[in-house]
Image (cartoon, helix red, strand yellow):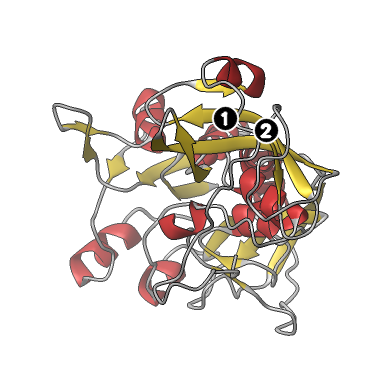
Amino acid sequence: MRVIFMGTPDFAVPTFKRIIEHGHKIVACYTKPPRAAGRGQREKKSPVHLAAEAAGVPVFTPKSLKNQEQQELFASHGADIGVVVAYGLILPKAVLDAPVHGCLNLHGSRLPRWRGAAPIQRAIMAGDKSTAVQVMQMDEGLDTGAVGLSTEITIDAQMSAGELHNRMMELGADLMVKALDMLERGELRFTPQNEQGATYARKIDKAEARINWNLPAQQVHNLIRALFPFPGAWCEMELKGAPVRVKILCSMVAQGQGTPGQILDDRLLIACAEGAIQALKVQRQGKGVMEVADFLRGTGSLQGQVLTSAQTKDGQDDAQI
């Protein structure tokens, strides 16, 4: 089939490559425009942009698809199907309707749970035990289209957002090419979503990354793994008399009791409102990732220090994760 591929980050690259490997023809690739990056502010192309250039696929980088000129150009590709994987732009109805079979989206949750920008992180933050990667028929709503195919994924107790991202990235690529093959044979069927139980996975706000020790240990642990590898959950520790931002990148729920935020031993066991978390990997501001033992060799024992919690604008503890 003739495919228009629309995607931007690393997450979308395996799907792009798998579509070509399975014999479909990608006639155009749409991705976010290059952006200035690095000290020299040189323009950096997206991972999908680079993959498309390597495959000899024409690349288009509009800032918007809302104007008629862009919509006419999109329609001129004569595509059978549009495939959307973490593209990053809103698709108006004229674009959604241009391909013969409309547009399919690869989404990282079990819809209608976690519609929106950050389904992987929100699922882990909420303590979900499982999720899914799904192929959905796109409509004008926010992840409200009917679902065609789905693959279930177990979220292990220690699984980070990065690990879940990589698992979905590979499973999703296989699922999308299966959907295209079934569509070509006229076998792909869609089931409307049940609006009951729909939740919104809002974009991660930087303020959420500061750890609130006035939460149960399980919630703190979920936050830490949901924000690894980016942006990383952090707290302030007093090191050699000065406050220093330290990211806790890996942890486990552990036995322990004390004032929330109190460091209970010389291995970085930290008390929460209920129970404690054992920090396993940390990153001091301006330094690389370290095992806790290596970190403590450079700081000495921090036992007894009480770490402050995130505060809301009115000065009250913010327990909303």
* Residue type beneath disc 2: Leu
Q: Which is more toward the observer, 196 or 253?
A: 253
- Compared with residue 237, is residue 128 higher up or lower down, i.e. above or below? below
Q: Which is more toward the observer, 52 or 280?
A: 280
* Displayed quadrant of residue 27: top left
Q: Is residue 24 visible?
A: no
Name of the residue lying farthest toward the right: 255
* Residue type beneath disc 1: Val
Q: Which residue is mark 2?
A: 268
In the image, what residue occupies the spot 64% across and 66% down? 114
Image coordinates for residue 151, horizontal then vertical, percent: 79, 51
293 horizontally vs 208: left or right: right
26 horizontally vs 136: left or right: left
In the image, what residue occupies the spot 58% across and 40% down? 228
Q: Which mark is residue 53?
A: none
Image coordinates for residue 278, horizontal then vertical, percent: 74, 37
In the image, what residue occupies the spot 40% across and 31% down? 285
Q: Quadrant of the C terminus?
A: bottom right
Q: Which residue is mark 1?
A: 282
309 horizontally vs 123: left or right: left
Image coordinates for residue 266, horizontal then vertical, percent: 69, 27
* Displayed quadrant of residue 40: top left
Q: Please tell me how crowded label 2 is: few (under 14), some (14-19), or many (20+) other residues with Cα within 10 Å.
A: many
Name of the residue lying farthest toward the left: 40
Callouts 1 and 2 close, C-beta under 8 Å: yes
- Compared with residue 275, is residue 139 higher up or lower down, i.e. above or below? below
Q: How many numbered badges does the structure rendering display?
A: 2
Callout 2 secondary element: loop
Q: Is residue 246 visible?
A: yes
Q: CA distance from mark 1 to mark 2?
A: 10 Å
